[in-house]
Image (spheres, grey):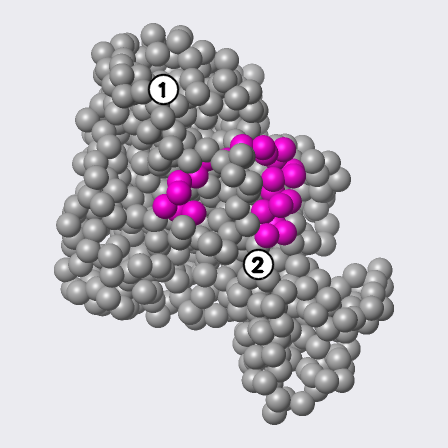
């Protein structure tokens, strides 16, 4: 590595027991010097460091003590360490070489963390991270002159149980702090996009419907021309109502070049939700396409004078103007283009893109993704993936943060080919595109993936390296069927719109090499994946935000990092509830194991993810209350709960204490009439309950609020599901 930056020298304790997450030769030399050479390195003989590391230690004249983790008791190792400490010599546990996936934050497998915890000697955590100045060099252990090492000696941990969990928490928080401090995160997303499109000018964006091809330099040139037209309108935000593909790329990039925030509009939402989005974002202008409008006649389209149609825009723009801007994109240096469009005028924590996510009342919540957030999450994803000759299938809508960040921004920033298709439910065509273009990275929801699997042959996904699934729970039967039928391992991930969005992901298994007796797993089921680097996690008691729990105990999940948002648009009271000292309260219940894998245990927030879409329980309750003509007092006689569903991830259950719902023999007729009623009210079909559970009364808390736990238990018990 080119250089080493050392932090926390004031935390040096001599003698002390030091526990690093990993160790490099440069860091070992620096630590040896800081400890004045009075140090013993503790090495498991089955978990050996690299030959270069051992040669360096010999040259330093360092003392090395060997033990075998599986054959030595904790008490024996404890006495061994205490013997050195009592004689004034510090001890450093030296991690060996492990088989690990890209972007792994620690070289210490979970058995060693448990072993360290059982020693009952408070360690001094050491954190070592690798960083670069481009999207793909975060946490890459390569000899790259653009990279550097950040090495931190942290304060000694307090004595007590669960040392392994506390070590992991310390490493993760320090890693998030170091990553967030990287100066390139304070740059402009737009500037980075311009440089990337110039760096990879001939990379293609393929239209899966027509076979048309748009190269990066042409996309940049057309966007430059359109940006000048948009800038003259004076909008601060413009709604983008387009599917994934060239049109969505040009609309988004044009807005960014014009200094305008693109607001990604959910065209699958209700009229009320769309109206709320328009009001909250202050939108007066929308970019769409006439062909797309024709495919969505039920969408509440804005007035014609508020619409910019892509076809009309390109037809009315003089051909000479388009050609000249494409030539400029091809010939001008990136620096000149950025200066021309003042791309650095909006950067770091400035607004880049606006998305909307469902609210607990059914009203969408506005999430601002800053330049910093998008750059951070694309880097976090890129470091976990091998993007060599990577070809993306982009079928997820760009109004979903995953579709926007991973299917659009990530390939543009890293120079990867994209094949777009606007309909993620057209499984047959998606499979054909994967085979035709030999696509290597496919992102989908389990619902869409199940349909693709039904229409797949054994070799359909032969080119696919990564089949990433998210937005809803991956059922074990679907996972197994993918493996047995097509030999593809579906990788479940986890994220939120508020985290831009990816937080964790499973990866394909890695086999340890002949000299690697241990490995850090690439996947753990039923976990939703290992934490991406640069993100910290905290677990608190579900009923007490101030009571922090060990990471391995189930509780409320909180995140902190450069990819985490700072609050919902116009929701100061809600923001006050979900943020504490820089930590974001997700509303998700879960825990982490000592390899860094998150396992979700349910959702306290009142949503269900059905087919990848967020359905608000309170919104459904409100619609049903109107449909049933219930008074405010009678509203407490119904409640919506979510349960697991093998087909769509989750399903809605209507708990009802209403007299007309007490006959279980009439369940099918009642549910059918409810579906009809909701359709007549223009409520999305996904909001219709799948089950009806008659109850004596709806559980409520002393405060008068719904007892969400009680409702969930009633639903699970009635349907014979495990809570």
Q: Which residues are magenta?
A: 271-293
- Can residue 326 be spotted in the picture? no
- Where residue 564 sits, quadrant-wise, is top right
Residue 629 vs 215, above or below: the answer is: below
- Residue 224 — which label? 1
Please state, as top left, top right, bottom left or bottom right, where the C terminus lies in the image.
bottom right
- Label 2, label 1: how far apart the Cα atoms are: 38 Å
Q: Inspect the magenta stretch and tell me whether residue 303 lies in it.
A: no
- Can residue 366 be spotted in the picture? yes
Please state, as top left, top right, bottom left or bottom right, where the N terminus lies in the image.
top left
- Where residue 343 sits, quadrant-wise, is top left
Of helix, strand and loop, which mostly describes the magenta segment?
helix
Q: Nearest the camera: 207 or 28?
A: 207
Q: Inspect the magenta stretch and tell me whether residue 286 lies in it.
A: yes
Residue at horizontal 76 percent and vertical 84 percent from the top? 659
- Residue 615 — which label? 2
Please count the marks in the image: 2
Q: Is residue 638 left or right of residue 200?
A: right
Of the residues under marks 2 and 1, which one precedes in the sequence? 1
Q: Nearest the camera: 532 or 159?
A: 532
- Under tag 2, what secondary structure? strand
């Amino acid at each position: 590595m080119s250089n080493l930056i050392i932090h926390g020298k004031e935390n040096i304790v001599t003698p002390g027991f030091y526990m690093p997450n990993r160790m490099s030769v440069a860091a070992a030399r620096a630590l040896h010097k800081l400890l004045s050479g009075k140090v013993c390195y503790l090495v498991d003989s089955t978990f050996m460091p690299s030959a270069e590391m051992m040669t360096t230690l010999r040259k330093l004249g360092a003392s090395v003590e060997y033990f075998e983790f599986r054959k030595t008791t904790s008490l024996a190792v404890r006495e061994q360490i205490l013997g050195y400490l009592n004689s004034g010599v510090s001890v450093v546990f030296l991690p060996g070489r492990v088989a690990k996936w890209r972007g792994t934050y620690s070289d210490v497998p979970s058995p060693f963390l448990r072993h360290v915890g059982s020693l009952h000697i408070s360690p001094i955590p050491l954190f070592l991270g690798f960083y670069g100045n481009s999207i793909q060099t975060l946490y890459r252990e390569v000899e790259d002159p653009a990279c550097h090492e950040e090495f931190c000696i942290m304060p000694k941990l307090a004595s007590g149980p669960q040392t392994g969990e506390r070590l992991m928490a310390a490493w993760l928080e320090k890693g998030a702090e170091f990553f967030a401090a990287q100066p390139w995160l304070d740059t402009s997303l737009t500037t980075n996009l311009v440089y990337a499109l110039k760096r990879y000018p001939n990379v293609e964006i393929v239209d899966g419907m027509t076979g048309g091809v748009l190269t990066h330099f042409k996309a940049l040139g057309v966007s430059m021309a359109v940006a000048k037209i948009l800038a003259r309108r004076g909008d601060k935000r413009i709604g983008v109502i387009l599917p994934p593909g060239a049109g969505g790329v040009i609309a988004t990039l044009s807005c960014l070049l014009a200094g305008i925030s693109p607001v990604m509009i959910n065209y699958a939402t209700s009229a009320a939700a769309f109206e709320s989005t328009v009001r909250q974002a202050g939108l007066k202008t929308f970019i769409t396409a006439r062909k797309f409008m024709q495919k969505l006649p039920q969408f509440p389209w804005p007035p014609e004078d508020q619409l910019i149609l892509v076809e009309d825009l390109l037809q009315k723009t003089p051909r000479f103007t388009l050609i000249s801007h494409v030539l400029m994109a091809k010939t001008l240096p990136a620096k000149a283009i950025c200066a021309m469009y003042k791309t650095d005028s909006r950067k770091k924590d400035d607004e880049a893109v606006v998305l909307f996510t469902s609210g607990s009342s059914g009203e969408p919540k506005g999430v601002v993704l800053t330049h910093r957030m998008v750059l951070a999450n694309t880097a976090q994803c890129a470091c976990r993936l091998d993007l060599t000759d990577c070809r993306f299938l982009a079928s997820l809508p760009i109004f979903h943060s995953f579709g926007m960040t991973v299917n659009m921004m990530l390939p543009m920033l890293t120079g990867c080919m994209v094949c777009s298709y606007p309909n993620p439910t057209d499984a047959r065509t998606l499979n054909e595109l994967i085979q035709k273009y030999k696509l290597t990275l496919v992102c989908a929801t389990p619902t869409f993936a199940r349909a693709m699997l039904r229409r797949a042959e054994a070799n359909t996904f032969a080119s696919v390296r990564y089949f990433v699934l998210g937005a809803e729970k991956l059922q074990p039967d679907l996972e197994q069927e993918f493996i047995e039928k097509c030999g593809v391992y579906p990788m479940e991930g986890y994220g939120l719109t508020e985290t831009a969005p990816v937080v964790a992901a499973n990866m394909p298994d890695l086999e340890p090499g002949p000299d690697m007796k241990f490995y850090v797993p690439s996947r753990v089921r039923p976990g939703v994946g290992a934490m991406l680097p640069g993100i910290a996690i905290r677990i608190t008691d579900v009923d007490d935000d101030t009571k922090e729990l060990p990471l391995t105990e189930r509780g409320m999940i909180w995140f902190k990092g450069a990819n985490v948002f700072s609050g919902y648009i116009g929701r100061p009271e809600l923001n006050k509830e979900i943020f504490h000292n820089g930590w974001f309260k997700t509303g998700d219940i879960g825990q982490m194991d000592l390899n860094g894998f998150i396992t979700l245990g349910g959702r306290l927030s009142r949503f269900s993810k059905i087919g990848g879409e967020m359905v608000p329980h309170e919104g459904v309750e409100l619609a049903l209350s109107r449909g049933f003509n219930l008074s405010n007092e009678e509203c407490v006689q119904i409640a919506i709960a979510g349960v697991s569903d093998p087909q769509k991830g989750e399903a809605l259950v209507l708990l009802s204490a209403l007299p007309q719902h007490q006959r279980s023999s009439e369940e099918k007729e009642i549910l059918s009439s409810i579906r009809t009623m909701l359709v007549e009210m223009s409520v999305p079909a996904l909001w219709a309950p799948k089950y009806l559970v008659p109850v004596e009364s709806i559980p409520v808390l002393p405060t008068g609020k719904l007892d969400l736990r009680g409702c969930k238990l009633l639903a699970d018990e009635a349907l014979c599901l495990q809570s």
